[in-house]
Image (spheres, rainbow, N blue to C red):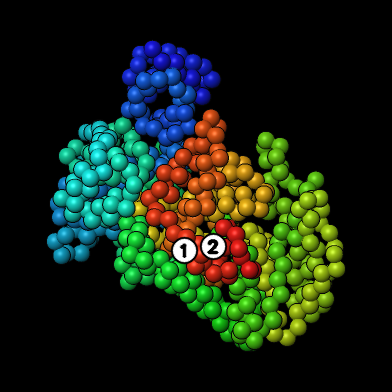
Amino acid sequence: MVKIFCVNTQTSKTFPEGTTLMEMLPEFDFEQPFPILSAKVNNVSQGLKYRAFNSRQVEFLDYRSYTGRSVYCNSLCFLLCKATEDVFPKSKVTIRRPISKGYFITIDKGDGTEFAQPDLERIQQRMQELVELNLPFRRMEVRLEEAIGLFRSLGYEDKVKLLQTSNDVYVNYYTLDDTPDYYFDVLLSSTGYLKVWKLTMYRSGLLLRVPDRHHPDQLAPFTEQPKTFEVFSENLQWNKIMGLENVGDVNLACAQGEAGDLIKVAEALQEKKIVQIAEEIDRRVHLKNPVRIVLITGPSSSGKSTICKRLSIQLKACGLHPVSFSTDDYFVNRLDTPKLPDGSYDFDNFETVDHEALQEDILKLLDGQEVEVPEYNFVTGIREMNGKKLKLDEGTVLLVEGIHALNPRLTDKVPASAKYKIFINTITSISLDDHNCIPTSDNRLLRRILRDFNKGAFTARESISNWPNVRRAEVKWIYPFQENADVLFNSTYILEFAVLRAHAERILMTIPKNCPEYSDAHRLLKFLNYFTPVSDKEIPATSLIRTFIGGSSL
């Protein structure tokens, strides 16, 4: 017998050895407004077919959890791939990235004809049939060489490259009916769980829409993101030119000694984009209704401060005189900070910024007045006046950086023509393989863990624990204004995960296995293991990556 402690009920029960989580579930009585999709066993993600042969701690999860959503969406992607293969046996499905509350997907039917609405309807019908059949997703554990041979025989060179650069002895893959596929995370028990989804034509491909994270019985509301899609497409095109569409391609390039060149090209591409933005600002500064203020925002760890500094340098190269401050300096005193329901401070709330005082100072600056701007003391939690004075002379551009910089309420009295808005994000265009895209938020979470740790601000465990609050605040206060920007800047770096690996692994390993945060640490460690590590010795001191790994000159 094994003893199982259920986190959901805070109770323990005994079961025969080898009992599955699915068989245990009915024995624990707790509220289940939505279907249980997976579980954390000793803080590691597992499917409901997991068998317990030793005593374990189990937390059952539905779609509202990050793990539950990942399991559901990966299974849904497999369902799409299986249905497409059934309808078009020679087809190729490429799952590009999450966008517009769904997944952007391209399908090559393999017969030389263009994909059209009738093709979509046939695939959608087949997907529904597979759901009604309630077919099981079966996990297979085999030696690495056997998996490579299988996927090579099927023509899945993307998976072959990924697995060839792995250092595992055994790997898992899944089958649905007679179709094998490889997925980073665990999958659902069967197709019958996949009740909520929709397939639609979208731009140059399709959009696989998924359930709403708060209301899993409904589709997530569609959100058009044309500028985000444009930036993603630009990066995707560059990846194709370089022959680096997936992680396996990058690993092989690094193994062939090309890492140094890839670093130089990545830096050059980012600097080229910053130069283009600076030149556009310079052009607008000399219009009849000139730009006077540049607003820079983005989610946590997107690189706002570093890009602001690098943009300042390029504006100087254009003959302009940039001056800058952060909206953080206008934080209300800590005692006046809004609070979350649990009583902790809500530092991401718009009301955390004294926006009235900030806008008043901006208007005075635009009127030619000299203004003493505050500096926030993060140690004492008090806004201080330390004699920092600003004045906008001819050729001077004001740069305002902060998470609320694009919120219309922050500068609603400033003429629209006087503002140039920049949104910085991490739009990851490279994928693990054709069916496994990389979550953009993981990119930023790793950055934040490293930055917090290197600054001595928070432990890795604390950074992970606070991440859900950060993400909720971004969805509410930052992302709604993304498409209002004049330009979107993608701060991702094609070798970023390869460079971060050496820095992040040792920090993530400090998180104890008996705490909830270990679940994310384990997932991130497993994810980083796919990347061939690259030394940071060729990363320049002005690189955005240096902000997070240390050694920045900015």
- Residue on which the image places disc 2: 545
Q: Which tag, 2 or 1, sits closer to the chain's start?
A: 1
Callout 2 secondary element: loop
Q: Is residue 163 shown above or below 53?
A: below
Residue at 35% across / 27% down in the picture?
50
Name the amino acid type tagged 2: Ile
Q: Can residue 263 be seen in this view?
A: yes
Query: Which percent across, then down, holds residue 343?
Result: 71, 37
Residue at point 52%, 46% (across, down): 506
Which residue is depicted at the point 33% across and 43% down?
168
Question: In the image shown, does 458 or 363 lie closer to the viewer?
Answer: 458
Name the image quarter holding the N terminus: top left
Q: Do the residues labelled 2 and 1 touch (CB within 8 Å)?
A: yes
Percent position of residue 277, x then y:
54, 77
174 or 419, which is in the foreground? Answer: 174
Does 501 sit left or right of 292 as displayed?
left
The C terminus appears in which quarter of the rendering? Answer: bottom right
At x 60%, y 74%, the residue is 311
Query: Relative to 432, is 319 on the left or the right?
Result: right
Number of numbered labels in the structure image: 2
- In depth, the one of 202 and 506 nearer the eye is 506
The image position of residue 518, as x and y in percent, is 51, 36
For the residue marked with disc 1, what is the amino acid?
A: Tyr
Q: Name the residue under label 1.
A: 493
